[in-house]
Amino acid sequence: MEEKKFDLNSIIGFALIFGIIVWMFYLNQPTPEEIEAEKAKKEQAEAQEKKENKENKDFIVDENNVTAVNPQDSLALQKAKSQLGAFAYSSSLSSAKEGTTTIENEVLRLKVSNRGGHVVEAQLKNFKTYDSIPMYLIKDGKNSSFNLNFGTTDNRTINTKDLFFEPTVSKNGENTVLSMKLKTSSSQFLEYRYEMKPNDYMVDFTIRSQGLQQVFSANHAPTLDWKLQGIRHAKSAAYENRYTELSFEYEGGKDDYLGQGDFTDDEAEDVTWIAFEQHFFTSILLTDTPFKTASLTSKNVANSSDLADKDIKVTKEFSATIPLALQGGELSYAMDWYYGPTDYKILNSYKRNLDEIVPLGWGIFGWINRYLFIPFFGFLSGFLPYGIAIIVMTIIVRIVLSPVTYKSYVSQAKMKVLRPEITEINEKYKDNAMKRQQETMALYGKAGVNPMSGCLPALMQIPVFYALFNFFPSAFELRQKSFLWADDLSSYDTIAQLPFEIPFYGDHISLFPILASVAIFIYMTMTTGQTMQAPQPGMPNMKFIMYLSPLMMLFFFNNYASGLSLYYFISNLITIGIMLVIKKVIINEDKIHAKIQENKKKPKKQGKFQKKMKELMEQAEQQQKAKKK
C-alpha cells in the first residue's frame, strides 16, 4: 500500500511542477509589441547584411572595366588584375565604394568623390541664384568631369574617373587637407591632394605619383581631361551667356579667350591657367608648371535656336585636354582650383593676372576701368546705396567732361550761323562738286571755323563711354542689388511681363531703357538740330539716324543690366541740362555771328598745307574742265 501511495504522490508532484512551468512560460511569453520589435530588429540585421554583401561583391562599371572587387573573391581579383594591372590593388580596398568626402570653409564647400578622386560638388556658400537657389558651380557631378588618361607598361589604358581613390582628411595648421590616393600598393600611388585655407576661394591642388616609374608608359603619357557645363545662374540666360566664355593665360603672361561661338584652340602653348567663366562666377585651374600645350573647346548651348530663354539650364560647354609631362617617370604638378566670384578685387588680390578674366575692355578702356572707375565706384558704394552711387558717379563724370561738351556745342553753334551761306554755295555750285568744296573750305577759312572741331570733342568721350559700357555689366558689386523698381542692377528691370515674346526685344518691358532712349532722342534732337542740313547725295540722312538710334537702344538694352541703362539715362539727362545752360546762359549766337563776320574781313594767312591743298584742288578742277572740252 505504501508503494502505491509513493507512486501517486510522485505523479501528483510531477503534474504540479509541469503546471508551474507552463504557468511561468505563459506569464513570460513576449507581448505583441515585443514580437514586432524583435521582427524589426531581425529585418534590419538582414538588410544590413545584404548591403554589406552588395558593397563587397564584384562591382562592374561596364563589361571591360572592373573597379571594385571583394578581396575574398579570388576569381574577381584575377579578373581585376587582367583589366587594371597594378591598379587592381585599389579595387580591393575598403574605400573601393561609392562615397564622397566634404571639405569646407566659410565661403566654399567641396564634395570630392571616391570614384575618380575629383570634385563632384562645388557650392559658394554666401551666394544664391536669381531664383534664390543655393549657388553651385558643380552639382552632383552631372555638369563636370575630371580624368587622367594614361598607358601602363603592360599595355593597359587607365582612366582615373572610373577607379576608386582612398580618402584621408588631415589638418595642416588651420588648413584642411584631403588626400585622394589611387593605390597600386600600400606605398605606391597616384595622389590628388586638396588643401583648403580658411575664408578663401582658392584651393591648393597637387597631382603627384609615388613609386609608379615602372607603371607609367613613356609612349602614352598622362593626359588631363577637364570638362564643365556652365549652370545657368541669372534671370536672363541670353545675357549671362554673352559674358560666359573660356579664358586662358599662356606664354608667360599673355591672355586670350575663345569668344561667344563654338570654337576650338589646339595651339595654346605654355598655358598657366584656364578659366571656365560664367559671367559672375568662375572655375579656374591654375598650374605652377606651365602646360606645354592645351586643346581648348567652347560650345554654345544657350543660343540654340530650339531653346527658349526660360528653358535654358546650361549656357556653355567647356573642355580642356592637356598632356602632362613625366619627370623621372613620375607625375608632379603643383596646381590650384579657384571656385568663386568673377570679382575684380578678389581675382586681382591673387596677383596672378586673374583680373584679365573680368571683361573690362582692351587697351585704354580697360586701363580707365582698372585705375579710375573701379576704385572710384568702390569708394562711392562704400557709403552710398548702389543705385545712388551710380547716379553720383555719372554726375561727376559728366561734370568733368563738360568742357568737352562746351567746345563741341560752340563748334555746332558756329556751323549753325554759317548754314545759310553754305546753303547758298551748294545752290550756286550744285553742278560742280569740286568748286562747291573749294568755296565751302574757303568760307570756313575766312570765318575761322574748323568743321572737325565738333567731332574731336566727341571722339575724346569715346574711351569713357566704352569703358563704362564694359564696367557696369562686369561690376560684381551690382549683382542682386536693388534700386527703385529694379530688383537687380546687374540684370534687366521689369515693369510689365508680356504674354508673348517680341523678336530681339523679349517677353518683358524694362523702364530704364525706355527712359534712356527718350533722353537720347532729346539730346540728339538738340545736337543734330544745330547743324542739320538737307541730305547730300550719297550721305546718310541725319534725321533718320536721329530716330533710329534711340529705337535701337530701346531694343538692345531691354535685356541688358539695368545699372547700365540707369547710367545712360542719367548721363544724357545731365548732358541735356549742361547744353541748355550753355545755350541759354553762356553762348550768344549773335556774338558768334558778329565775330565770324569780323574774321572774314581779316586777311587770312594760309599755311603750307592749306596752300598745297588749294593748288591740288585747282589742278583737279582744271583737269575736270579739260576733260569736258
Image: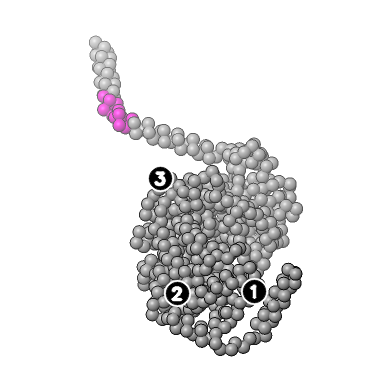
Residue at 50% of width from left, 69% of height from top?
532
Q: CA distance from mark 1 to mark 2?
A: 44 Å
Which residue is at 58% across, 82% downward? 445
The numbered mark, 3 or 1, whose residue comes first in the sequence reads 1
Q: Which residue has dot 2 on it?
A: 397
Determine which of the numbered discs, if any, sits on residue 435 in the image: 1
Look at label 3 and name its amino acid. Pro
The residues bearing labels 3 and 2 have C-alpha atoms spaced at a distance of 39 Å
The residue tagged 3 is 499
Residue 599 highlighted magenta (yes or no): no
* Circle nearer the N terminus (1, 2): 2
Q: Which residues are magenta?
A: 23-35
- Side of 598 where 330 appears, left or right: right
Please tell me which residue lies in front, 84 or 607. 607
- How far apart are the alpha carbons under marks 3 and 1? 60 Å
**Does 415 sit above or below residue 82?**
below
